Amino acid sequence: MRHSIKWTMQRLLMIALTVTLLLGIVATGCGAKQETPAPAGGAAGKIIEWDLASFGMSDKGMLSMALFADTMYKRTGGRFDLKMHWDGALLGEREAASGLKTGLTDIGQIDTTVVEAGFELETLLNLPNLVPASGPASMALEMRDFIEAYRQNPKVQAQNAKWNIVPDLWWTIPMGQVNIAGKKPVKTLADLRGQKVRTPGSAMKGILEKIGAIPVDVEYMEVYSGLQTGIVDFAPDYAYYRDFQKYHEVAKYLTTGFEITQSQSQFWAVNLDSYNALPDDIKKILREEMKRFQLIDQEFAAYEQMLGIEVQKKQFAELNELPAAERQKLVDISKELWQTWAREMDAKGLAGTEMLQFALGLQAEIIKKYGG
């Protein structure tokens, strides 16, 4: 088995069948790569071996990457071999960006709620309620369109290039709908006062502090045990990652309607030196397949938004929805945080006000496009 993924046959078949039916992808042979004959005339060249470092993915995300790796292997005639390292085996979430920069991995998973310094302009994508998300059916697509357009801004690309990553090549990881899982029901924001909440990034920290909660910095892979042991009382629950997180096993209650971290930005990035060393034909294939599989991920995530909450209703002992008036309070607080972000970026000479206005323009365009 080429990929270090521990699948149960039942889960693999179920997910592969779902992807095949929904997206038209034939997922047979994704556990081991099919050997492809070398191109005629001995043009295969040497085998290029790359590493991919992940610190936490859903089953669906892992399957997408396995299919991506197999496709790259086949399309290059066996010249490109991607070895995947899951669950922080090669780099944890705090080391991922620096490890990618120095070449410890060729493709890395970056979470800018964890690594904010040096990705300051990327952190706009973490601001609560800024990325439009009209509803479960279109949320993933709206997020995709917003993030793609924002990352094409020259200022964002120039900043990302300082991390020795290919600035115009990425694969946005869908996060989807965010709920709050915990050991007690939450029916108003007041129910979170004095409660310890797992906090990915400074943007969510700001909103939690304003409602009287206690932000706690816990790595993603430690959230389950944190809920289990009481290190945190609540944690953001991503519907798309429910099969990986399994928070329902250690928290009885789920509350929807928060979506205060819905716009957090995670993405796969490529080391620039590794990319530059590739033959031109493999560069072309890599770009094509990263773009294609990113779309597959996002389209599947859109479906998962509709499915996820129905599944979670059965998983958790009790499900509550935050009332509209309470959600509006979160929106009002969020807008204050947007302005705070802009002022802080301006103070660093990073054109925060300009970038926020650019983002608000994108927001308006996407809301109009999806009828939100």
Image (cartoon, helix red, strand yellow):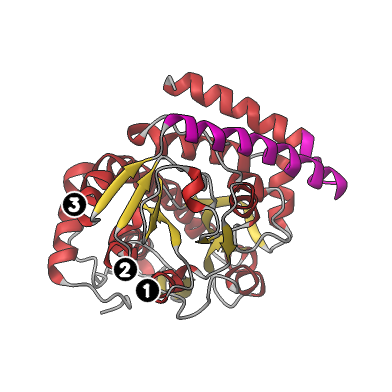
Image coordinates for residue 363, horizontal then vertical, percent:
57, 28
Tag 1 secondary structure: helix
In this image, 159 relative to 265: left or right? Answer: right
Sequence order check, earlier mark of 3 and 1: 1
Q: Magenta segment, which residues?
A: 324-353
In this image, 101 relative to 318: left or right? Answer: right
The residue carrying mark 2 is 250
Whether residues under marks 2 and 1 lie with C-beta atoms below 8 angstroms apart, the answer is: yes
Q: Principal SS element in the magenta part?
A: helix
Whether residues under marks 2 and 3 lie with C-beta atoms below 8 angstroms apart, the answer is: no
* Residue 178 visible to the viewer: yes
* Residue 66 visible to the viewer: no
Q: Using a 10 Å C-alpha cutoff, classify the residue at mark 2 as few (fewer than 14 neighbours), some (14 to 19) or many (20 or more).
A: some
Which one is nearer the viewer's eye here, 358 or 256? 256
- Relative to 206, does residue 68 appear above or below in the rendering? below
Task: Tell me the tag on residue 228.
Answer: 1
The residue carrying mark 3 is 314
